[in-house]
Amino acid sequence: MTAATTAETAQAPPQGHPQRWLILAVIMLAQLTVLLDNTVLNVAIPSLTDELGASTADIQWMINAYSLVQSGLLLTAGSAADRYGRRKMLAAGLVLFGAGSLCAAFAQSSTQLIAARAGMGIGGALLMTTTLAVVVQIFDDTERVKAIGIWSTTSSLGFAAGPLLGGFMLDHFWWGSIFLINIPVALIGLAAVVKLVPESKNPQGDRPDLLGALLSTIGMASVVYAIISGPEHGWTSAQMLVAAAVGVLVLGAFVLWELHIPYPMLDMHFFRNQRFIGAVAGAILVAFGLSGSLFLLTQHLQFVLGYEPLEAGLRLAPLAVTVVALNLTAVGAKLHAKLGTPVTIAAGMSMLAGGLAVIALLGGDDYNGMLAGLVIMGAGIALAMPAMANAIMSAIPPEKAGVGAGINGTLAEFGNGLGVAVLGAVLNARFAALIPVAAASLPAALASAESAGERTRIMDAFSSGLETSQLVGAVAVLLGGLLAAELLRRAVGAPPRH
């Protein structure tokens, strides 16, 4: 059997691949390690400051190097997976991610850890794009929404379990252990991928778009860096404005280049499809609300309510448990089949916004209010996220599944960065307005407090800022979700244009 025949066979099995559910389990394991490392480092910040002598800037680069490299390479990684084979890229991603984790675990300086995290980001980009692309390949239309729903539970598990796992490891081992646990998972995943996952690639074998890959990587990395540096250096600082300008100009050049070549890495005609545009808007806003709220809640649980890292992680777990329960029982898939994509997304985004509002109004000083909000958010995410991922992937030809997954991952990364930046900026502005101190963060402000009363005022100001930022996030998610649903509703029945 020729390689082309093998690829075509793997791409469109009549009733799905016979081992598709086992393969899905392998894929979820591989992806979980990538997603854990988006949040696991947050709880290790005090340890890194003490043991590596890391400055605030060092800490920010340790966290951001991973997401910056990963988000910059997602489109390129997806295109490479389509061209060279999705199983090959999945295996390569596991190898690179495992090697980067090993280097990070034994880093002796901040610079070494930042470099290792960047290497992990390369592997993470390959894994993020190939996992969803393989899911689309091995499941037929009747099971795809359910499979994507189960796949998407990994995202929620990663966000919620990162602080939980990190807190547990730090309670028992040294800080490097949070990276060392990736090694056995990567090895198990690599063996399973080689044995179980079928190879699939674009049978047309388009020529590689090297300039497009370079432009998209530079452009996306610059935009994400601008979002990351905005809260730290100011939204009108030269550093942020230059990065944003470079990102916009380079991405503009990328669009022009893709429109004028016969073998584009990203077919810009996708953006003529209202179904695609609606799903894109929704995907950004789900990530915006989820990552922004978790970023703030992790600080609130530790700094204001006084929980240790492990305790804080445990108290965020109900969100992930809700998502997992609803998706593993196929509740989301059943409702999607009954209600259709637009209504499902509108309902899910409304619940996500409602959960943010509940946390803002009831969760400031009482964990019970926060718990109710987390459960409502989890239900909304379980409905909206799989429906939007399916809408994005169904609007893209199967042979471009890797690029489709790259778009989905890029949107999630962009939404993550935007959520942290915007909601963080709202919190900081409110905090600074209420507490006119020179300190740039809550820990620094608390450290400079001269009395218990002043500490109380500082924490009250932080809680007020948290409430304001969550309400802003709720309004943005609700309005954006309704807009996305309306675009999708208009697109129903209309033939897709590629």
Image: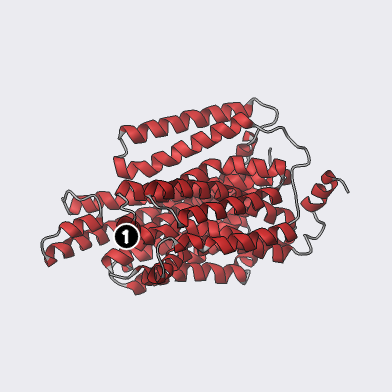
Image-based side of 379 in relation to 405, left or right:
left
**Which color mode does the image show?**
secondary structure
Mark 1 falls on what kind of element? helix
Q: Is residue 382 above or below residue 11?
A: below
Which residue is depicted at the point 27% across and 51% down?
A: 428
Give me the residue at 60% from left, 39% from top: 76
Q: Nearer the viewer, residue 309 or 338?
A: 309
Quick one: 233 or 466, which is closer to the camera?
233
Tell me the residue that label 1 is attached to. 46
Task: Name the residue: 55% across, 57% down.
Answer: 385
Q: Residue 402: image x %, image y %?
A: 66, 46
Say whether residue 134 is left or right of residue 423: right
Q: Does the image show residue 422?
A: no
Splitting the image into 4 quarters, where does residue 450 fall?
A: bottom left
Residue 73 is situated, as x and y percent measured from the top left of the image, at 55, 42
Instruction: Using the image as rendered, state which of residue 165 and residue 483 is in the foreground.
Output: 165
- Residue found at x 77% / y 60%: 17
Of 177 and 36, which appears nearest the observer? 177
Residue 477 in percent (x, y) is at 44, 53
Mark 1: which amino acid? Pro
Quarter of the figure with the C terminus: top right
**Residue 4 against residue 138 in the figure, above or below:** above
Q: How many marks?
A: 1
